[in-house]
Image (tube, helix red, strand yellow):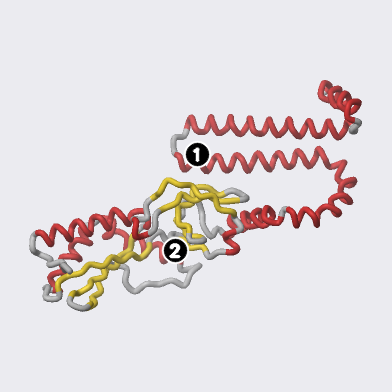
Amino acid sequence: MKYIKNFSEFLEKIFGINSDYILTSILIIIFFIISRIIIKIFIKVYNYFNQNEKLRYAFNKRIHIIMNVILIIIIFFLIEKYLKNIVTIISFISAAMTIALKEIIVNFFAGIYIKIKKPFQVEDRIEIADIEGDVVNINIMNFELLEINKKNSGEQSTGIIINIPNSFVFSNPVKNYVKAFKYIWSEIQIKIDIDSDLKKTKGIIYRILNKNDTIRNIPIKMRRQIMSASTDYRIYYNKLEPIIYTKIVDNYVELSIRFLMHPKKLRNVEDYIYSSLLLEHNKGEIVLYKS
């Protein structure tokens, strides 16, 4: 401490700035560096003993928040004696700062809104401003999405990280695919010959659906999630099992297969359904329409 004080007095002679201000600034910098070192040590030790990536991410966020709060408290005590002198200055520059930093301020409060209200969380699949992806990070100023393809391209990851300002949640609707429950309704359409045995065809399709463990187990899980979400949302369904709707279009019959599915598993399940239908068609059990 003695050397720091001597150094601040030395700088006072060079720059003509009060040595107390210089000393306080040096201490703030030192405490900031120490806090960063402590964070790195804690993260390194935690990562060494824990291989779970989800827990690592959560710990990284918590340790940053804790150390930043401690740093703010330390800084407050260091500058407490100067606060009365700077209140007047702050009042003059606050209006200008508000205008100049409007976007930053809006992003900051939007970040607080996201943390408290939780319109989405890390790992949720959302769509905002025509951008669809999985939330991989949320900061006080922005959040990041791992972009996915549109539905007709399989809704799989493109590998592109998109940085979105938090203020977007105030100016754009947010679609959350998994907020109330993890599963969404999906539909695929197939065309069969108008002379097909409709009852037999539907029976085969239901058998295909019920043979898939993912499709078969979701209604049970969905009922539990609906019960859990019913206190916050007025949501109810009469039927959760897969259902097939029939529609006559020109000279063929269109069957809409509606089923519940986790968004991230949809492409694999669709591949299973289409592959199974083709196998049944090749065996002559189903007559798919040929235009």
- Residue drawn at x 86%, y 35% as measured from the top left: 21
- Residue depicted at x 72% and y 53%: 101
Q: Which quarter of the figure has residue 198?
A: bottom left
Question: Type of residue at label 1?
Answer: Arg
From this viewpoint, which residue is outermost toward the left?
284
Pointers 1 and 2 in contact (CB under 8 A)?
no
Q: Residue at x 52, y 33 (%)?
A: 46
Q: Is residue 202 visible?
A: no
Toward which corner of the image does residue 31 lie, by quadrant? top right
Q: Residue furthest top?
A: 3
Distance from Cα at disc 1 to Cα at disc 2? 28 Å
Task: Tell me: residue 55, above or below residue 261.
Answer: above
Where residue 224 appears, as percent x and y from the top left, is 38, 62
For mark 1, what is the residue? 56
Residue 133: image x %, image y %? 45, 54
Residue underneath mark 2: 228
Three-letter residue code for mark 2: Ser
Location of residue 189 in the rendering, given as x and y in whole percent from the top left corner: 26, 67
**Which quarter of the rendered picture does the C terminus lie within?**
bottom left
For the N terminus, which image quadrant?
A: top right
SS category of the residue bearing label 2: helix
Position above or below: 186 against 66:
below
- Sequence order check: which comes first, mark 1 or mark 2? 1
**Residue placed farthest to the front in the image?**
291
Locate residue 242, reporting x and y percent.
Answer: 27, 67
Residue pictured at 45% horizontal, 63% vertical: 180
